[in-house]
Image (spheres, grey):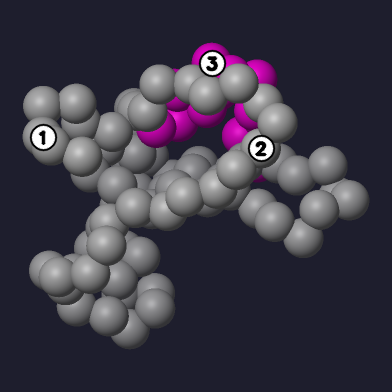
Amino acid sequence: MEDVKAGKRFYVGRGLTVARSFGGKYVEFTSDGASPVKLALYQRRGLAKDVGAPADGTGSHRIASSSATPPAPSPARTDSPG
């Protein structure tokens, strides 16, 4: 993610609670404990380092999930084609 702070504002605005945050580099949101899934946002370079991949990789830069919750607008840049 290019702008972790914008992503943090987006998810906090939708009711998520921050568990940990390190400036504009990383933010982790609390989980209800019943789910093994946790949401955390990293800067692209930091995530690439964490998983041992090149930061300028050519793979997908997105993740998809589904839910019964109505869709919300993405905090991602809207000036580039999807």
Q: Nearer the viewer, mark 1 or mark 3?
A: 1
Q: Nearer the viewer, mark 2 or mark 3?
A: 2
Q: Residue 3: where, in percent of width, then height?
A: 26, 37
Q: Which mark is residue 67?
A: 2
Q: Position of residue 37 (x, y in %)?
A: 70, 56
Question: What label does residue 80 carry, if any?
Answer: 1
Q: Which mark is residue 13?
A: 3
Give the secondary structure at mark 1: loop
Residue at image coords 35%, 65%: 47
Question: For residue 35, which numbered disc appears in the image?
Answer: none
Q: Quadrant of residue 30?
A: top right
Mark 2 is on which residue type? Ser
Which span is picked out in magenta? 7-19
- Is residue 82 left or right of 72 when viewed as pictured? left
Mark 3 crowdedness (10 Å alpha carbons): few <14, some 14-19, many ≥20: few
Image x and y of residue 33, in percent: 86, 50
Q: Is residue 6 above or below residue 51?
A: above
**Residue 54 relative to residue 38: left or right:** left
Tell which circle, 2 or 3, labels the residue nearer the N-terminal end: 3
Q: Is residue 66 magenta?
A: no
Question: Where is 3 relative to 45, above or below?
Answer: above
Looking at this view, name the residue that lies furthest to the top: 13
Which residue is depicted at the point 60% across and 21% down?
A: 70
Depth check: give the residue in front, 22 or 35: 35
Q: Earlier in the sequence, mark 1 or mark 3?
A: 3
Place of residue 78 in the rendered image (x, y in percent of width and height, measured from the top left)? 19, 26
Q: Residue furthest bottom?
A: 52
Residue at point 27%, 80% (across, down)? 53
